[in-house]
Image (cartoon, grey):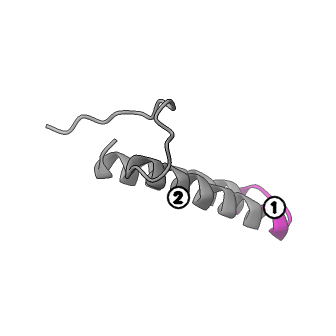
Amino acid sequence: MGILGFIIIAAVLGLIAWAVTTYIPMPAGIKKLITIAVIVVLALLLLSNIGILPFHDVAFPQINSH
């Protein structure tokens, strides 16, 4: 996955997290937990794709840019 794929995944995850925390009533603690979870997932995904973390057996979506 290239930088374009990462940006698209980050945008989609961010949009989903924003929609969930905005439109679903829940305590502030759970909203923080959702935000932290999204940030951790994106950080692990980024570190995996630049080769720092060895998650090579995990299948990430491939985006072909022409």
Count the numbered circles shown. Answer: 2
Which of the two marks, 1 or 2, is nearer to us in this view?
Answer: 2
Q: Residue at x 20, y 39 (%)?
A: 65
The disc, 1 or 2, on the residue closer to the chain's N-terminal end is 1
Q: Residue at x 35, y 45 (%)?
A: 5
Nearest the viewer among 1 and 63 is 1
Query: Residue 2 got which mark?
Result: none
Quadrant where the C terminus lies?
Answer: top left
Q: Residues within 10 Å of mark 1 (few under 14, many from 20)?
A: few
Q: Residues within 10 Å of mark 2 (few under 14, many from 20)?
A: few
Nearest the viewer among 7 and 12 is 7
Amino acid beneath label 1: Ile
Q: Examine the structure image and report whether residue 28 is included in the region drawn in magenta.
A: yes
Give the left or right position of residue 5, taking residue 26 as reference. left
Pinpoint residue 1: horizontal percent, then vertical percent: 34, 41
Residue 55 vs 16, above or below: the answer is above
Pinpoint residue 32: horizontal percent, then vertical percent: 74, 67
Pinpoint residue 17: horizontal percent, then vertical percent: 62, 55
Give the left or right position of residue 17, taking residue 57 as reference. right
Whether the residues at callouts 1 and 2 have beta carbons within 8 Å, the answer is no
Query: Residue 30 got which mark?
Result: 1
Q: Examine the structure image and report whether residue 48 is included in the region drawn in magenta.
A: no
Residue 21 sits in which quadrant? bottom right
Give the left or right position of residue 44, taking residue 52 as reference. right
Amino acid beneath label 2: Ala
Pinpoint residue 10: horizontal percent, then vertical percent: 46, 54
Residue 32 vs 3, above or below: the answer is below
Q: Residue at x 30, y 46 (%)?
A: 2
In this picture, which residue range is highlighted in magenta? 22-30
According to the picture, the residue beneath numbered tag 2 turns out to be 43
Residue 43 vs 48, above or below: the answer is below
